[in-house]
Amino acid sequence: MIKKILFISITFLLISCNKEVKIESYTILNEKNRAILKDELLEDRFTNLLPKLMDKSGIDMWVVISREYNEDPVIKTMLPSTWLNARRRTIIVFYRNKEKNTLERLAVARYDIGKSIKSAWDKEKEPNQWKALVDIIKERNPDKIGLNFSEHFALADGLVKTDYEAFLNNLPENYKGKIVSAEKLAIQWIETRTEKEMKLFRDLVAITHNIIGEAFSSKTITTGKTTTNDIVWFLRQKVTDLGLETWFHPTIDVQRSKEKLKSHIESFSKAKKEVIIQPGDLLHCDFGITYIGLNTDCQQHAYVLKPDENDVPQFLKNAFKKGNRVQDILTSNMIDGRSGNQILAASLQQGKSEGLRPSIYTHPLGKYGHSAGTTIGMWDSQGGVPFNGDYPLERNTAYAIELNTTVYIKEWNKDIRIMLEEAGFYGEGTFEYVNDRQTSIKPIELK
């Protein structure tokens, strides 16, 4: 009997793996179609984006070196759908000849890296991988050789000490002076979103919103019974059931009329206390998912209606508007060439001049949840973020517009915190939300 049940379960699983899942009007692709789309997006980036970025950085040869299970964060964004990890030591060489308008993509590896990068190493003819790499460099004689090392940007610092030393030991002396940090190139490769990626990203943000909508509903919540931890695990399970992934463990927290507002350090860095949800609770979530190489990050609010209430109280609606206002102030200050620290300072000054009590901690979003690009504050660095906050705002980049504002509620005789986070896109000099934003607290009817 056990064997029969197991067989049926496995059969069902195999059938399910080939199906595509619908959530509202959005389709979550099956594994095969995800692979096709991932490879199409990657080829588009290699063909239409990378040459421009290399020209902009002034680097005509980019050498990316990584070993299996210890991948450079950059190379993880370059692997095709059938490569879940690097293999052995994987070396990729991108050579840009601006005069001929060509970009060579060469793998100094035993294998082609998907269809986009062809193997340029015949181990039978040249057993030494490092010598094969040096031969490629000599033949092309680049002006600058970019390597992924960076003191301040972790995602651009993926070249490990062992590989760096081996590279230097094998590189002729006359080429060592050409080595430069590929920091800016690596950051812009990771942070820049293409038009094709944005189509996928818009759907992904909408799916994130839909999942939150289901979590914050009477379908999921029974007052006096459901706990904040129950909702956390509902989110995790829902993501798994849809064939998606979470890139961080979600959080659900509660603000109430008779409980003191938590400090920033309690809200952001300490474990959340499990609470049973009751009528009159102001709920807040922090939730993000991963799909086909992109990530979302979202914070929204809901309110559990009391038996005598038909809508969210007006005083909470007014408080929420102040959160939206801080968003507007921040995004209006996102201007070409400004650093994250400049945007932060201008936004905080403007918000405070309007009588608000804002805190801003917006970060790049995309290939990673906390991605490469300029950082606009951290919750514990409201005076600016050294180095990462000095990086300029670039076009065609995405951000988690993450912030809060503290509001005194007379009816509760206490402060509350409106905490918001939505995916935004800075395009050709203008800002837009990737798939709208929350503009009112979601009411949850009593169950």
Image (cartoon, grey):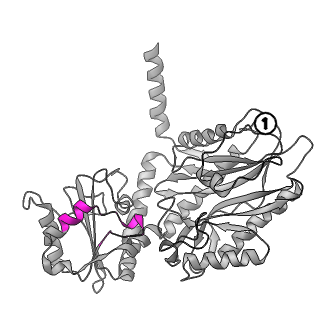
Looking at the image, which residue is at 73% across and 37% down?
A: 276
* Residue at the left extreme, as displayed: 125
Q: What residue would you read off at disc 1? A: 223
In the figure, 86 relative to 281: above or below? below
Which SS class for mark 1?
Answer: loop
Q: Quadrant of the C terminus?
A: top right
Please identify the residue farthest to the bottom as the structure is shown: 99
Q: Can residue 193 be seen from the camera position used here?
A: yes
Magenta stretch holds residue 159: yes
**Residue 334 in sight from this viewpoint:** no
From what the image shows, is residue 287 above or below residue 136?
A: above
Range drawn in magenta: 147-167
Three-letter residue code for mark 1: Thr
Crowd around label 1: few <14 · some 14–19 · many ≥20 (10 Å): many
* Image location of residue 385, percent across then percent down: 53, 71
Q: Which residue, as the protein is rendered here, is positioned at the far top? A: 1
Nearest the eye: 66 or 344: 344
The front one of 161 and 277 is: 161
